[in-house]
Image (cartoon, coloured by chain):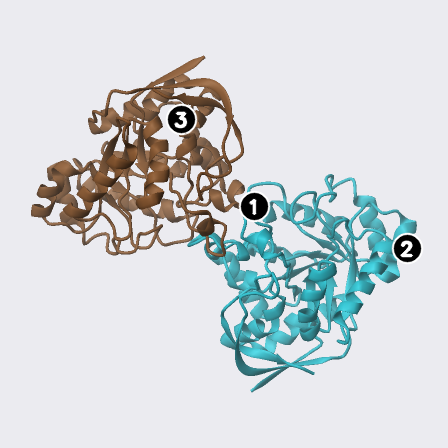
Chain colours: A cyan, B brown
């Protein structure tokens, strides 16, 4: 049996830089026609030069795959001139509240002071991607941020707002209430809960931000993905860290899922008899919502069990050591 | 300034065996007149021979301190004859639901089938110490177990039942409702929440079972301890693991707090102007509740700042690297 996917897109991806980028980018380029590239490097991608250099570095790392890096800028209170000049080089702008996740120092600390920039983004048609977490108790952070989404959705009705990597049923509920609100969800948040992270032995390789939540949340997200919810897009949030930053006294947040994404998505959707919804989830919704035209690649998976390596270089992947049934066939 | 404590007791302590026991036991013996020793070794302490040998091993490791190891048995459905023979050698019996924590395989899987043994313990005056967690969602486990405590407290009104290492305000509430229910609480659950474990970088050395909960829970536990709640006893649950079992892909549960217990308790109670309640919390309550007569030692602490080492042998202690104001003076 074969599964064929047209132009799959990963709408939330961390590629890092340098040697790590060269290690991890080919996994994404082999499976996806394009991906939204997160800008939270050190220093962040927040100007034209940095953007052009990072884009070039990615292009070199994914060669020869026909792969479209959808570049993003790290949110700053940019002025109109800057935004106009950058507009054609970016897909969107990513907003991080200060300090909420990996490399988010320098993020936004006053969420109301930035509204002039949001108004300009609305005018220019630049989507706003948001890591929507408060600074509250770890399990409440996403829920506590929802009123901010609501305010922005009402204040800027033509601004396309994407709630990134949602983890709760409450965030999902919001999608139906505002036409300009959209969301991405990761593979791992369709599969795991806090019980997997910290309910048995503690598993640092499953630790990410936002942290995995309750079974009821996971079940709601999975049901929406399997139903092909038209405002929910796949975004892996694959975020590699070297093993010595994961298996450590202070473990960095991030799940490196890039190598296993399409094989595990096909297995998951097949198990739930929802393979017919997978094309919308991994491509159709994103293309329609954002009007994207990625390279017209067709990615094919066949049933051919393989064991996920325990490491790729010095990075431990999601599902390390597990046997997966499907694999992507080289084009 | 000096703080003097009469016969401090650690009512919940993991000493392990062999080299680890010899490494960690002196920290407890230097600070406490006695401790309740947990029986979840591999294999567990569940017979007279194992009990005698373990007791002897502990005695040798704490020499020359006058330190009373209050031995416990791993709960089995013991018959009357066995219980009678073991009675004089033990302080209590510790019950683990199967699989809920470190080395709890072989614990109790059917909580109703064991009631005949509980009835015999009630007759013989043997306290029941319980790791009270269900197999549900990690943050709900303690709350879900509370009805079991209630059933036992009602069914066996003369059985002294100790809810070990409580972590929630809900468990605390139960103390006031049943005269035969008591509780221990750890130092770390008076200080940390899930935010410390997993809200910033993930901290495996703060990972324990039951996992730390919400700020409201921590605040309720702390308030009760500072108020000298008469049914709440200090029990550290200090549980050492070698560093390669903590900073690992699968991290074992347990916080090694033994070296810092009294210094941090004094600092905590002093900060809240509650030093006058500390003697009850670390000794008086336990002596009264259980009728204990530990060695009549007086432990003295003086203000003399010291930095907690990053490791003791291959074990990372709680508060590693922090400067503490108080230290125990050698007798």
Give the side of residue A55 with respect to residue B104, left or right.
right
Is residue B273 visible from the viewing direction of this image?
Answer: no
Q: Residue at x 33, y 55 (%)?
A: B99
Q: Chain of mark 2?
A: A
Disc on the earlier residue, 2 or 1: 2
At 74% across and 58% down in the image, what residue appears? Answer: A17
Badge 3 density bin: few <14, some 14–19, many ≥20, Cα 10 Å = many
Residue under circle 3? B262
> Residue B220 at what x, y percent from top left?
43, 32
The mark found on residue A84 in the picture is 2
In what element is the residue under mark 2?
A: helix
Horizontal side, residue B143 vs residue A283: left or right: left
* Residue depicted at 33% across the width and 39% down the height: B22
Q: Quadrant of the N terminus of chain A?
A: bottom right
Is A272 located above or below residue A53 in the figure?
Answer: below
Which residue does the numbered mark 1 point to in the structure image? A250
In this view, the residue in front, A123 or A78, is A78
> In the rendered view of the protein, which quadrant contains the C terminus of chain A?
bottom right
The answer to whether B297 is drawn above or below residue A184 in the figure is above
Subunit ID for the residue under disc 3: B
Tell whether label 3 touches label 1 (CB within 8 Å).
no
Is residue A214 visible from the viewing direction of this image?
yes
Q: Tell me the crowding category of disc 1: few under 14, some 14 to 19, or many 20 or more residues within 10 angstroms, Cα based.
A: some
| Of the pair A138 and A38, the residue shown nearer to us | A38
Same chain for mark 2 and mark 1? The answer is yes
Is B261 left or right of B94, judged from the image as shown?
right
Q: What kind of element bears circle 3?
A: helix
Q: CA distance from mark 2 to mark 1?
A: 41 Å
> Is label 2 or label 1 in front?
1
Closer to the camera in the image, A116 or A294: A294
């Amino acid at each position: 049996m074969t599964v064929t996917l047209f132009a799959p897109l990963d709408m939330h991806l961390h590629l890092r830089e340098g040697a790590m980028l060269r290690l991890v980018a080919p996994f994404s380029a082999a499976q996806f026609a394009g991906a939204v590239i997160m800008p939270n490097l050190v220093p962040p991608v927040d100007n034209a030069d940095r953007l052009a250099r990072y884009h070039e570095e990615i292009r070199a790392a994914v060669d020869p795959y026909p792969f479209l890096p959808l570049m993003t800028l790290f949110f700053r209170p940019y002025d109109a001139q800057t935004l106009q000049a950058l507009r054609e080089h970016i897909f969107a702008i990513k907003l991080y509240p200060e300090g909420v996740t990996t490399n988010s120092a320098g993020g936004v600390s006053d969420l109301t002071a930035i509204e002039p920039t949001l108004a300009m983004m609305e005018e220019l048609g630049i989507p706003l991607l948001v890591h929507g977490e408060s600074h509250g108790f770890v399990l409440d952070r996403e829920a506590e941020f929802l009123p901010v989404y609501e305010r922005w959705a009402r204040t800027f009705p033509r601004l396309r707002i994407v709630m990134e990597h949602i983890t709760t049923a409450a965030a999902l509920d919001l999608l139906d209430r505002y036409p300009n609100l959209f969301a991405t969800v990761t593979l791992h948040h369709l599969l795991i809960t806090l019980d997997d992270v910290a309910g048995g032995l503690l598993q640092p390789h499953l630790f990410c931000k936002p942290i995995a939540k309750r079974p009821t949340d996971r079940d709601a997200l999975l049901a929406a993905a399997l139903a092909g919810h038209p405002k929910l897009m796949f975004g892996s949030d694959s975020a590699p860290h070297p093993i010595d930053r994961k298996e450590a006294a202070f473990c960095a947040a991030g799940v490196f899922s890039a190598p296993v994404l399409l094989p595990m998505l096909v297995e998951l959707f097949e198990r739930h008899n929802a393979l017919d919804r997978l094309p919308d989830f991994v491509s159709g919704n994103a293309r329609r919502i954002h009007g994207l035209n990625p390279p017209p690649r067709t990615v094919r998976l066949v049933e051919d069990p393989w064991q996920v390596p325990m490491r790729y270089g010095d990075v431990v992947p999601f599902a390390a050591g597990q046997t997966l049934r499907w694999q992507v066939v080289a084009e």
